[in-house]
Image (spheres, rainbow, N blue to C red):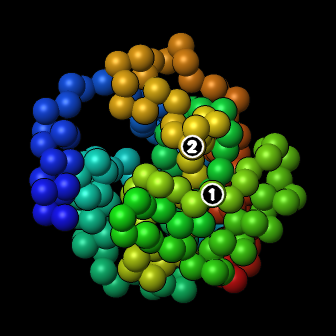
Amino acid sequence: MLLVVCALGLQWALAKTTPGANDNASAVAAMLQAAEVLNRQLPEDTELWVVATGAEEIGSRGMQAFMNRHPDWPKDRCYFINFESVGSTHLHYAVNEGASKKTHYSDASNAFAARLAESTDQGPITPIELMIGTDGRVPARRGYEALSLVSLEANQVPRNYHRPNDIAEYIELDTVQRAGGFAVEAALAAAQEKRIG
């Protein structure tokens, strides 16, 4: 097992950088789109934080550091929405994620996402057991309600994932916009209900 972990670490250390249009500029675009709408529409008693973290590929260190700075945030009053590579064809919400150590989103978070996905105008958004890890796992593991949006190709991998051709020309802008729109719906519903489950 240690050999596998070391080999994976060596792969990331030696890997060439990629343009990153889908992973993860598409997520930043969806996040900013959602933030612009939510900044105008959220109730006054609701605080909006928009955070773009780094080092997701090496254990979500940016998200870990962010969460460590806010250990006292109440679990019953916070809702995290994570975007991961949302420029592919099929938009999903993760019910769990990770290849070796699965992170499971709570039953309440999954039921909330399923209910919204059934009634959204954003087109089909389906549940998925995600084989990759995202920053959404950090708040989920710490007991917060969370939604992680990801888009995948038919092979269950984001388009041009970690490849030199991860460029803007291959991004499905419609999917990016749908992810941002669905996040708006989720945040507004969570703020209105004051709960997820």
Q: Please report contact status of discs 1 and 2: CB closer than 8 Å, yes or no.
A: yes
**Where residue 28 sits: x, y (%)?**
46, 39
Give the residue type at disc 1: Ile
Tell me: 29 left or right of 119: left
Q: Quadrant of residue 1?
A: bottom left
Q: Residues within 10 Å of mark 1 (few under 14, many from 20)?
A: some
Report the residue marked by disc 1: 128
Report the residue marked by disc 2: 156
User: Residue at 51% of width from left, 40% of height from top?
Assistant: 157
Tell me: 108 left or right of 66: right
User: Residue at 25% of width from left, 73% of height from top?
Assistant: 68
The image quadrant where one finds the C terminus is bottom right
Residue 64 circle label: none
Identify which residue, 132 or 66, lies in the foreground: 132
User: Residue at 65% of width from left, 80% of height from top?
Assistant: 108
Residue 49 visible at all: no
Identify which residue, 103 or 20, lies in the foreground: 103
Choose the circle earlier in sequence order: 1 or 2: 1
67, above or below 50, in the image: below
User: Residue at 48% of width from left, 46% of height from top?
Assistant: 84
Tell me: 192 left or right of 13: right
Q: Residues within 10 Å of mark 2 (few under 14, many from 20)?
A: some
114, above or below 13, in the image: below
